[in-house]
Each structure stands twice: as structure tokens, then as C-alpha cells.
Amino acid sequence: MADKAPPPPPKPPQRPPKSPSKPSQPQKKKPAPPKGKPKGKPKGKPKGKPKGKPAPKKKKRRRIKINTKLGLRQKKITDQEDSYTDQIGWTAMAESFEDYEEPTPAEPEIVTHQCSMCGSTMRIPRPKRERYKVICAYPECGHSDMVGI
């Protein structure tokens, strides 16, 4: 009986199944990634050789050029249709105009007047009326002369 195999080890004890009447605890969510730097593809050119098989190159699309002939078609050009003459343009007239002279603005004429009280001379514009009054420009005199009385 020494040739008999030893008995198998005992089975570990099993837990009883959870009852559905008990409220279960909420499952924990994974923490959100930090808002500072996003962890995605690295920026800039990759250094070194790319790993894996190279991607197939895309074929360039060729742009098709459309040749169109734009023209006017006419069966015949006849002499009757081609008898157009210019009727618009400059015409010669018998009248001849004299050279136009621009009127130069007449500058106001200046008259010299001498005060009858103090004797100072003043230059005044030519008056438009027959009678006019001239007040002496000398501050101490202030005399007014009536001209054309």
C-alpha cells in the first residue's frame, strides 16, 4: 500500500455570493488628466528613423485642362453688310472763334487822402459813392473829413 498516491489537497473555502438587496458601493472613476500640458503627440519633427513600415505615398491628382474655342461663326461676309461708315466725330465749321482771354480781376484802386486837421496822409480804397467820410487813422487826431459835399 505504499504504492498509493497521496490524497489531493483540500479546496480553499468559497465566499458566499452577494445578495442583490444590499446597496452596492459606486465604482471609482479614473482620475481626469491634468489641465496643464496635454499628453498627446509630441510637437516638432521626430528625431531618428520612423518605426514600422513606411506609409504608401498618395498619388497626386492631375488637373485636367479643358480646351475650348470661343469664336463667332458666320457663313459669309457680304459687301452689303460691310458698307458701314463712321458718322460720328469732329466736324469742320465755317465760324472761327477769337481767342478767349480770361478776365483779370481788377485790383481795387488806392486813393491817397490828407487829413485837413493834422496833415497826415492815408491810403484808402477808391470809394464807390460821390460822397464819403474818411476818419483819420492818427490816434490823437480822430478827425473825420466829409468828401464830395
Image (tube, grey):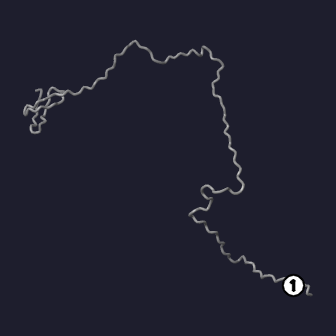
The residue positioned 47% from the left and 18% from the top of the image is 89
Q: Nearer the viewer, residue 5 or 45?
A: 45
Circle count: 1
Seen in the image, is 128 located left or right of residue 56?
A: left
Residue 139 x/y as whole percent: 11, 39
In the displayed orientation, state which residue is furthest to the top. Answer: 94
Residue behind mark 1 = 6
Residue 81 lies, with reference to residue 47, above or below; the image says above
Residue 54 appears left or right of 1: left
- Give above or below for 86 relative to 124: above
Q: Position of residue 105 (x, y in %)?
A: 27, 26
**Residue found farthest to the front:** 48
Residue 33 vs 107, above or below: the answer is: below
Image spot of residue 26 (x, y percent): 65, 73
Tag 1: amino acid: Pro
Q: Is residue 103 above or below residue 122?
A: above
Q: Is residue 32 left or right of residue 116?
A: right
Q: Nearer the viewer, residue 64 or 1?
A: 1
The residue at the point 61 percent across, 55 percent down is 45
SS of the residue under disc 1: loop
Q: Give the crowd class for mark 1: few <14, some 14-19, many >=20 residues within 10 Å.
A: few
> Within the image, what quadrant is residue 142 found in?
top left
- Left or right of residue 101: residue 60: right
